[in-house]
Amino acid sequence: MDHSDLAPYTGWTRADWTGLADRLLDAVTPYASPSFARYQLPGTHTSHSGNDSDALEGYARTFLLAAFRIAGERGEGPVATKLLERYAAGIAAGTDPAGSEAWLPIVPGRATQPMVEAASIALGLHETRAWLWEKLAPDVQERVTRWLGGFIGNHTWPNNWMLFQTISEEFLASVGADHRDDEIVRGLDALEGWYVGDGWYTDGRTSEFDYYNAWALHLYPLMWTRIADGGARGARAVEAREVYRSRLRRFLEDYPKFIGGDGAPMHQGRSLTYRFGAAAPLWVGELFDCTPLSPGETRRAASGIAKHFIDRGAVNAQGLLSLGWYGEHLPTVQPYSGPASPYWASKAFLGLLLPSDHRVWTAVEEPLPVERADFVTVLNGPNWILQGTQNDGIVRLHNHGSDHVDRSSGHEQDDPFYSKLAYSTATAPDTAEESWVCRVDSHIALISPDDTPSRRGAFTRLGASADGDAAWAGSVHIPHVTRADGEAQPIEGAQIESWTIAWRCWDLRIHAVDATEGWGVREGGYAVAGHEPLAIHDDAVSRPSDGLTSSLTGILGWTRQSVHEAAEANAYGSHSAAPALHAAHPGGRAWYASLASLTRPAEAGATDAAASIQIQADGSIIATFPDGHRVALRPAGE
């Protein structure tokens, strides 16, 4: 069976994955220190932890990839031998505190970046235990455990970082080194408080949902059970494994719906520069035999994600993963990321732990959900709607639950990676510095008399539901303004209740806005971006290369429309633009409604057909879409 028979959608087989792994690992070697303990990759962006931390990150994250490659070959053959020599030398030099290539230590009393990298090293050492760890000299093993032992007595940030401590100290326990049992289970206990059902966790905060659910919060607990198996916590690991397996199974029921027909994963949340790391939970489902997907679906989804980025320039001319989404795009990157941060994409190679004759490598690829049919899916955990259309392969995410607001501190922010009304597999929000201020695309705001848009406060969910082929979700928030000291304060008497109804390629957006007279109201549609100038229409933006079109049509309350353009603000291209609607608020409560669409190419009638809503005396809403489909909902969470 050749590639086209085995992989009719992507053309990728296991050989393509191993080939990519080898190319990525070979490309970083020119930037290694003499003993391969530090990888100082080139780039104009240094993380806020500094160059020494970035160099450690280069070792740890590429070691994770090397470990999966070594374990997949059972430690045999020229590739595994070469990698074992390189990374064994690196770990010996990196853990020598008197050496010139010494790694930054895990500092007592502080949550620092080496904690993150320690988990990758511990996990890699476990997976290569027979071929690397057990072959290290006793004094090197002692140095390794002393370096990892910096965790002991320490606290991490109260989010996925707690699992880094769990993994690292469980590895210490597995090799008979000092550790603290309470610190190992502390992260696992915290995880239980983060679980919200249907396979979803928050990342330690009330409403922080993103890919960390997939590549951290499901991955590390299950991998912990591999390390703990047979040890002091073996019985707990066996029991917990079944809980974690059932949660991942539930999560994977919906996860392929986050992937567009071109293999693009949803562009939402932080750390998107990890790119095809989004494939990790698909492999974990097979690794722990807890996936509801067929082997052909798993490989189609995972290979599709990786191929999507490889085909679009994620690997630069030097063979390195750049900081960005496709090519380098620093506004996509958080301050904690350095040049080697993208190598957490290594998690996408977990499938290499499965042997070449495993069903996931021998099955014929099967289509993604969006390649089979249109769908709308309600995700109650994060209060999202996923909306996919087969004809253009686009999946849209309607957000009424994730806001990245730290409620414990009372700090309100308006993070474009989290707080937009909608995201998609074909677009990205504008994320340049000025975009955080003007906040146009997929956003609803009050506009002050001096033309300053409000910031979006924390969501209160109003629930989500589906009725046949349509679905809706709602939320309410208190808009904030920024004070002179940079902090946000709520606008007195103001509130915005928002609802999205998803049907076919449309999302009908309805807002009940409470504010005093004198404020304006503005809403934006999806931002379309490309490297060529965009086609600007009255209420729509199109990308000439493929016809991707974002439109936003006023239905109720809006009096003016515009298009907001930006440069170098968007991960999808240097030119970006989003349609917008405007109105002067009359005071008190007023209703606003719009019809947004995102299609590729523009579906006939999608951007110019009429829609309507009727507000009933009892507060319910009757919405009619351009094709005549009607949906009724009762807002305010009733």
Image (tube, rainbow, N blue to C red):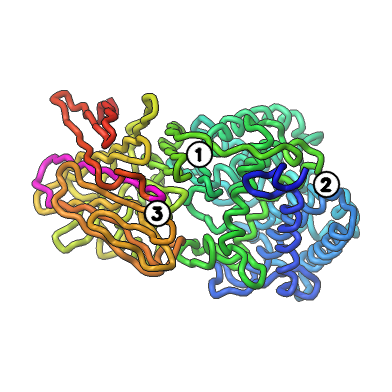
Given contact means CB atoms under 8 Å apart, are the residues at marks 3 and 2 in contact? no
Q: Quadrant of the C terminus?
A: top left
Residue 243 location, quadrant: top right
Q: Nearer the viewer, residue 391 or 191?
A: 391
Q: Is 431 drawn above or below residue 191 in the view shown?
A: below
Q: Residue at x 28, y 28 (%)?
A: 631
Visible residue check, residue 373: yes
Give the x, y percent position of residue 402: 41, 43
Q: Which mark is residue 175?
A: 2
- In the image, what residue type sits under mark 1? Val
- Which quadrant of the rendered structure holds the N terminus? top right
User: In this picture, which residue range is highlighted in magenta?
Assistant: 584-601
Quick one: 432 or 51, which is closer to the camera? 432
Residue placed under numbered mark 3 in the picture: 548
The mark lying in front, picked from 3 and 2, is 3
Question: x and y percent of residue 415 in the render?
Answer: 39, 54
Q: Nearer the viewer, residue 158 or 9?
A: 9
| Residue 370 numbered tag | 1
Instruction: Specify the principal SS of the magenta part.
Output: strand
Q: Position of residue 48 (x, y in %)?
A: 53, 67
Amino acid on which disc 3 is placed: Leu
Q: Reading the chain from its start, which is encountered first: label 3 or label 2? A: 2
Q: Secondary structure at mark 2?
A: loop
Q: Residue visible at 53% across and 50% down?
A: 264
Disc 2 to disc 1: CB gap under 8 Å: no
Residue name at image x 34 percent, y 66 percent: 566
The secondary element bearing badge 3 is classed as loop
Discs 3, 1 touching: Cβ within 8 Å: no
Q: Give how far across and how far down residue 362 sits, in percent.
A: 76, 39
